[in-house]
Image (cartoon, rainbow, N blue to C red):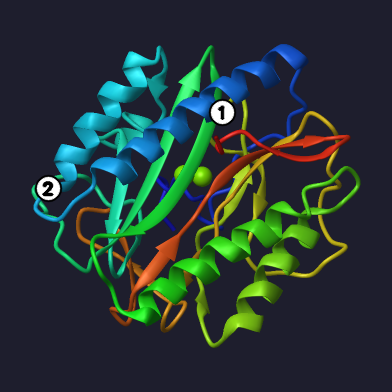
């Protein structure tokens, strides 16, 4: 698998364990998350057919730096941009460039920011103009599965509980492909920390959550097969069958009061 994955490749686990963040670090994560959320909100507002993905990327970089943060992806394992923008059958890690967004495209935008050394990471998939009902449904199912996973982010719950809830939600909605090679992750002092958080799995397994831990949950759901391949640019991951894909992500803090989403306004 890739050394360069943002949505961690399963074969590419980072060393070390899940970190418990200090109150000061959690505050920095809240600020990083807020900046990511504001940037993604702005992307939704300005996105329109006719723009290139590079246009969006330039606005995002200016937003993030203007709010006093650092784009988390730029330079990460050599990634050249602020956003990952993945259109239609592209699942994740698309590189912004000359590609023009067309009416009817599904546009996945993944964004990360660093404040005081602490990270926020989130993604949304939006429709450019009108899209078929089947595409809208894919967006709803994918975002719904993210929320089902977030509901499980509670002290004492295990990573497998998150994975199982995401999988069960998607499977309850129809015959979708759940991407297996790329997964969610711990987050905080680095973009990718342990543990990995697959979007499928068995409840009761894996690390138990403690207050001060943080996770990035990021289901990737396909209309067809779950199988993927990587394009010749060594970054862009696409569906093996050319079917549409969607991706939603939030960064969530584990607290005694339940899940706290840092990347939601
Ligand atoms: Mg991520
Ligand atoms: Mg991300």
Residue of label 2: 51
Mark 2: secondary structure: loop
CB-based contact (under 8 Å), mark 1 and mark 2: no
Whether residue 198 sits left or right of residue 50 in the image: it is right
Query: x and y percent of residue 95 in the render?
Result: 24, 47
Above or below, comparing residue 105 to residue 265 in the picture: below
Q: In which quadrant of the rendered view does residue 80 lie?
A: top left
Query: x and y percent of residue 205 in the render?
Result: 84, 61
Front-lying residue, 130 or 75: 130
**Which residue: 9% across, 53% down?**
50
**Which residue: 76% across, 16% down?**
23
Quadrant where the N terminus is found in the figure: bottom left
**Which residue: 63% across, 81% down?**
171
* Inter-mark Cα distance, 1 to 2: 32 Å
Front-lying residue, 145 or 199: 145
Residue of label 1: 190
Q: Residues within 10 Å of mark 2 (few under 14, many from 20)?
A: some
């Amino acid at each position: 698998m890739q050394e360069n994955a943002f949505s961690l490749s399963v074969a590419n686990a980072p060393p070390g364990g899940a970190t418990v963040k200090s109150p000061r670090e959690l505050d920095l994560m809240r600020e990083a998350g807020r900046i990511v959320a504001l940037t993604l909100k702005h992307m939704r507002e300005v996105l329109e057919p006719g723009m290139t993905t590079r246009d969006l990327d330039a606005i995002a970089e200016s937003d993030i730096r203007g709010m006093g943060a650092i784009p988390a992806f730029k330079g990460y394992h050599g990634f050249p941009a602020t956003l990952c923008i993945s259109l239609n059958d592209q699942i994740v890690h698309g590189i912004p460039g000359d590609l023009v967004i067309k009416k009817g495209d599904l546009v996945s935008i993944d964004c990360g920011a660093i404040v005081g050394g602490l990270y926020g990471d989130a993604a949304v998939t939006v429709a450019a103009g009108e899209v078929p009902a089947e595409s809208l449904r894919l967006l709803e199912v994918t975002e719904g599965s993210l929320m089902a996973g977030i509901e499980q982010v509670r002290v004492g719950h295990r990573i497998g509980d998150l994975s199982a809830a995401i999988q069960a939600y998607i499977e309850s909605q129809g015959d979708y492909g759940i991407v297996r090679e790329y997964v969610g992750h711990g987050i905080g002092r680095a973009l990718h920390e342990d543990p990995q958080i697959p979007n499928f799995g068995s409840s009761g397994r894996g690390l138990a959550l403690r207050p001060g831990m943080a996770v990035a949950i990021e289901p990737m759901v396909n209309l067809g097969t779950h199988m993927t391949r990587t394009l010749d640019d060594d970054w862009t991951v696409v569906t093996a069958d050319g079917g549409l894909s969607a991706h939603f992500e939030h960064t969530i803090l584990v607290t005694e009061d339940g899940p706290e989403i840092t990347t939601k306004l």
